[in-house]
Amino acid sequence: MKTWGRYLEVGLTSFLIFAFLNSPIMAGKSGFNTAIAAQAQTVEQEEAQNGQKVNDPYEHFNREVFDFNDHLYFWVLKPLARVYSAFLPTDFRESIRNGFHNLVFPSRFINFVLQGKGEYAANEVARFLINSTLGFAGLFDFAQTQFRLENHESDFGQTLARWGVGSGPFLIIPGLGPSNPRDFFGFGVDSVMDPLFWLPGAWYVSFSAESGKFVNRTSLEIGRYEELKKASLDPYIAMRDAYIQYRAHISE
C-alpha cells in the first residue's frame, strides 16, 4: 500500500509537471483516439453480426483519413509519447491524467444534468470535491479508492442521443479519429465547456495544454492501436464497428 509520503512525493512532482503541460512550452496537439482501439480487438464487421448495413456512405473518404491518422500516430504521436514516457514513471503520468480528468468536471456534470441523471450528477460533484482536496487537485482518484465513488463518463454526444438526435453517417475526423456528425458536434460543445479552453492568454496557451493532455494519455495507451491492427484483417472495419457499438452502448 502506498504511504502518505509516497502520495506527497508523487503529488508534488506531478503537480509541477501538470503545471508545465499547461504552459505555452508544450505544443503540437494530436488527438488520435487510441482509447477506441481497446474496444476493437475482438470486433467483427457489423454486417456479418446482424445483417444490417452500417451507415458509412463516405467509406472511401474515411479510409483515406484513417490512413492519414495511422501515419500521424506512428510517425508523430507515438514517438513523442515514447520520449515523454522515458522521462516520467507511470505513477506520475497516471497522476497527470487524473488531474486533467478532474478539470473536465463541468462538462460531465452539465451533461449528466441535461440527461436527467441526477444521481450521476451528484456523484460527480462529490468526486470533484474529494479529488480536488484530498486528491491533490485531482492528481489522485481518492473518491474511488477511498470512498468507492465510481467514475462515470458523459459527453454532449450522449446528451444529444438521449434527446433523440440520430448519429448520422460514420466519419473519421483528421487527427481525432472515429466519430459521426452528432458526436463531432458534441465534441465541439464539450471542448467549450473544458476549462482549458478558457485559459487566459493567446490561443496557443490552451492549445499547448490540450497537447500535453493528449501526449500524456497516449503514453499510457501505447500498444492498443497496434493490437487492433494485429488482430484485424481490416483495421478500419474493426475500429468503425467498435466505435458504433461502443457509442450505442454508452448512449443507452
Image: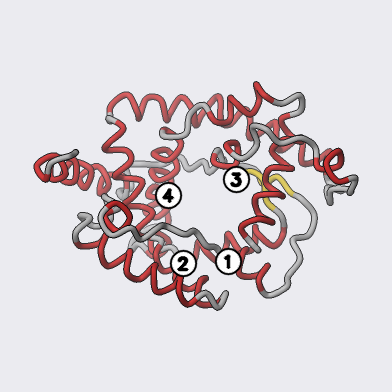
Helix, strand or loop status at disc 1: helix
Residue 245 bears which disc, if any? Answer: none
Disc 4 and disc 2: Cα gap in Å? 15 Å
Disc 1 and disc 3: Cα gap in Å? 16 Å
Residue 156 bears which disc, if any? Answer: 1
Residue 34 lies, in percent from the top left, at: 55, 38
The residue depicted at 76 percent of the width and 50 percent of the height is 170
In the figure, residue 248 lies in which quadrant?
bottom right
Quadrant where the image shows the N terminus: top left
Disc 4 and disc 1: Cα gap in Å? 19 Å
Mark sitting earlier along the chain (2/3): 2
Disc 2 and disc 3: Cα gap in Å? 19 Å
Give the mark toward the camera: 4 or 1: 1
The residue depicted at 72 percent of the width and 35 percent of the height is 238
Inspect the image, locate mark 1, and give the three-letter code of the amino acid beneath it: Phe
Helix, strand or loop status at disc 4: helix
Tell me which colouring the rendered structure shows: secondary structure
Quadrant where the image shows the C terminus: bottom right
The residue depicted at 54 percent of the width and 30 percent of the height is 224
Whether pointer 2 and pointer 1 mark residues with C-beta atoms closer than 8 Å, the reply is: yes
Inspect the image, locate mark 4, and give the three-letter code of the amino acid beneath it: Glu
In the figure, residue 84 lies in which quadrant?
top left
Residue 72 lies, in percent from the top left, at: 58, 31
